[in-house]
Image (spheres, rainbow, N blue to C red):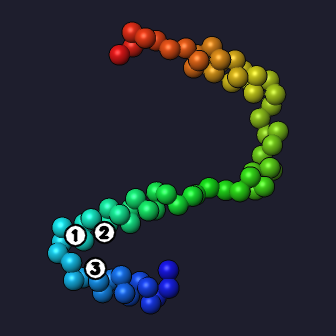
Amino acid sequence: MSNTIRAKVIEQLETLPENLQGQVLEFVQALQMRVRRGVPGKKLLRFAGAIPLDDVELMRQAIEDECEQVDLNEW
């Protein structure tokens, strides 16, 4: 954000009552949650193959055995 925009936002924000400043803060926080965060896939390629295939198979089997079941009486 340029300093000009930041200054204008702060100038306008300071004129608002505290409850509306709180709404502005909530809005900014909501906008931040929408911003994509993460790492491009190309940067993750160096990790390809880092987990031994035997371990990958154990994880796949555990997920299949434990995570793909629904307990209708749980709630």
Q: Residue type at mark 1?
A: Leu
Residue located beneath label 3 in the image: 13
Q: Which residue is mark 1?
A: 20
**Left or right: 50, with 13 as reference point:** right
Q: Tell me: residue 2, above or below residue 50.
A: below
Q: Earlier in the sequence, mark 1 or mark 3?
A: 3
Q: Amino acid at mark 3?
A: Leu
Is 12 located above or below residue 62 in the figure? below
Contact between labelled residues 3 and 2, with CB atoms less than 8 Å apart: yes
Residue under the point 43% across and 85% down: 5
Which image quadrant is residue 51 in? top right
- What crowding class fits label 3: few (fewer than 14 Cα within 10 Å), some (14-19), or many (20 or more)? some
**Element type where label 2 sits in the image:** helix
Residue that carries the numbered disc 2 in the rendered image: 24
Report x, y in % for residue 22: 25, 66
Name the amino acid type tagged 2: Val
Label 2 CA crowd tier, 10 Å (few <14, some 14–19, many 20+): some
